[in-house]
Amino acid sequence: MEKNENNMLIVGNAINYLQQALKQDDKNYETLIALSKAYDKKKSIDQAIEYAEKAILVKSDETSLLYLVQNRLMDLLKKL
């Protein structure tokens, strides 16, 4: 297995565990951020943005999240 494939497998497993954690507490800021970052690594930009937005709603004083969403939106626009 190539390094990139192995990394994607690890990211996929992390996403599964984080989704399970989210079922226990769907407003857990750290879990939402971790999911956003994991989906970003997986290049699933829409899902990364979705979880970043949910985290923003949970902890709206986090301006760094706004930058994350803005950067992902810019990535999407570049692909158009």
Image (cartoon, rainbow, N blue to C red):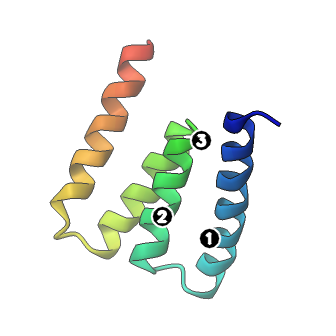
Within-10-Å neighbours for mark 2: few <14, some 14–19, many 20+: some
Residues at circles 3 and 1 in contact by the CB criterion of under 8 Å? no
What x and y, as percent, mark residue 67?
Answer: 22, 46
Residues at circles 1 and 2 in contact by the CB criterion of under 8 Å? yes
Task: Quickly name the residue at label 3.
Answer: 42
Residue in the image at 53% along x and 43% along y: 41
Q: Earlier in the sequence, mark 1 or mark 2?
A: 1
Residue in the image at 54% along x and 53% along y: 38
What x and y, as percent, mark residue 25?
Answer: 55, 86
Q: Residue furthest bottom?
A: 24
Task: Quickly name the residue at label 2.
Answer: 34
On screen, 57 above or below 46?
A: below
Q: Secondary structure at mark 3?
A: loop
Q: CA distance from mark 1 to mark 2?
A: 8 Å
What x and y, as percent, mark residue 14?
Answer: 65, 63
Residue in the image at 73% along x and 60% along y: 13
8 left or right of 36 in image: right
59 left or right of 28 in image: left
What x and y, as percent, mark residue 6?
Answer: 73, 44
Task: Quickly name the residue at label 1.
Answer: 18
